[in-house]
Image: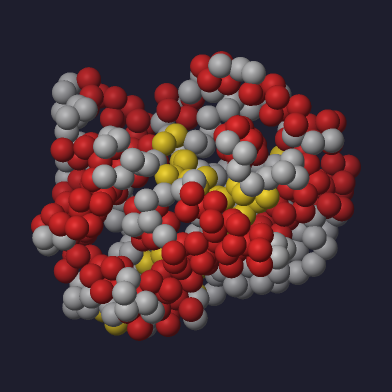
Amino acid sequence: MSLLQKCVERAALRSGADQQEAQQAASQLAASPIIQSGPHCHLLIEPDAFYTHLFSLLGLRAHGLRWHVCYSASTVKFIERTKKGPGWLHLEGEVVNVFGLPRSRMDSYNICGFNGPYRFMLSGQKCGEPANEAAARLKAILPNTEFASAANAIKAGNQALWGKAFPPQVRLLQLDDIDVADLVADHLEDPGSWFSTRFVGDGLFAHCIFEEIDNLNAGPWAGWIRRTTDLFWELVEGKIFPLRLRDKVLSGGYGSQFAVGFEPVSIAAALRRREIVPSLLTTFLVTSILPGVRVLGGCRQTVYYPLMRYVVATALERLGERDLLNALGADIRPGVWGHRVLKPSHGYPFLEIEKNGSVLDLLSNYGEQPLAQACGDLASFTSDPVWAELSTCIGNGTIHSRSPEWQWAQLS
């Protein structure tokens, strides 16, 4: 937790807070350990992100908390599906190209990559010109400068949008995968950190993790935790590539010359050089599982996060790590559903902000609704094929509430 607090303090300082305010943000995290982890690294006015942040604001205001701490995955590409992703917005019925990038670049690159410069363009069919009047007004709010990465641009843009339309009583604090890379490096450079001495250490724990993930994917929980990479991604020229751990070395695939020894000093140095970034499992280890922080995620996270806790706990048990296993078992803050909870109202978030001047009316409207009404038709669950498969397994009894893999979803 102390290392995570230092990470939060650094992020607060970068967002414009002074030293006292940054320390207050770190103190809040220890007192109220909760992080919004649902939306990927999007501009705040992207609908999925916007209504998720509103949902968190309802809770923050109810509890009188000052800082909205969120982790946004930035290892994603500019396009996540057709005309949707960090590289796109929809304004006044038009598709807007956030950075004015060609399709080939958006298809291939990840927004965490330092292969800029990136500048907000909000262009339409005519490159270099705002797509419409709303895009022109939005562009006037966003920073008019160049950024080394798209993720840095988005975080700066979100600070500007937050200051314009969100309640000043709550401050925005954004973490992405580069922040988590530094947090992991902090662990690895700390000889007292369990992550450094035991998780990396001789590599046995990591291999237990891989075996348990493989076991999950050989049974009814298949697909919920995918072994797409081993703990870290290689980051090169704005693109990420999977790594595999063999013989105490993390190395790339066929044709890759990249290799780093699986020991604390080497991995920390590679993280600091931005040659590698953490996987999602590694991210949740240092931001949630080890420090005991609740994460508010989407419909899939409500299943894969408890399974991550199960994988870690099973590895701990196999290697006799009883102290940490007991601490994990006593954790009263497992993850919960917190992304895409509110059903979007009609229109576009940016136009609603312009119409009302702030999000206060929206907060009041949602705050007065019962949850069953505010969350709408639960389409993110009912239209998801992975959830459909889970439903089938529950229906035929293959998976049930007493399944050993599900015990780590429960409160103590």
Q: For residue 301, what is the image quadrant?
A: top left
Camera-side residue: 37 or 211? 37
Picture quarter with the C terminus: top left
Q: Position of residue 388 (x, y in %)?
A: 33, 27
204 horizontally vs 161: left or right: left
Q: Residue at x 68, y 45 (%)?
A: 170
Q: Is residue 217 among what the camera can see?
A: no
Q: Position of residue 156 (x, y in %)?
A: 71, 59
Camera-side residue: 75 or 186? 186
Q: For residue 12, what is the image quadrant?
A: bottom right
375 horizontally vs 230: left or right: right
24 horizontally vs 132: left or right: left
Camera-side residue: 168 or 138? 168
Above or below, comparing residue 185 to residue 361 in the picture: below
169 horizontally vs 372: left or right: right
Picture quarter with the N terminus: bottom left
Q: Is residue 247 among what the camera can see?
A: yes
Q: Residue at x 42, y 74 (%)?
A: 185
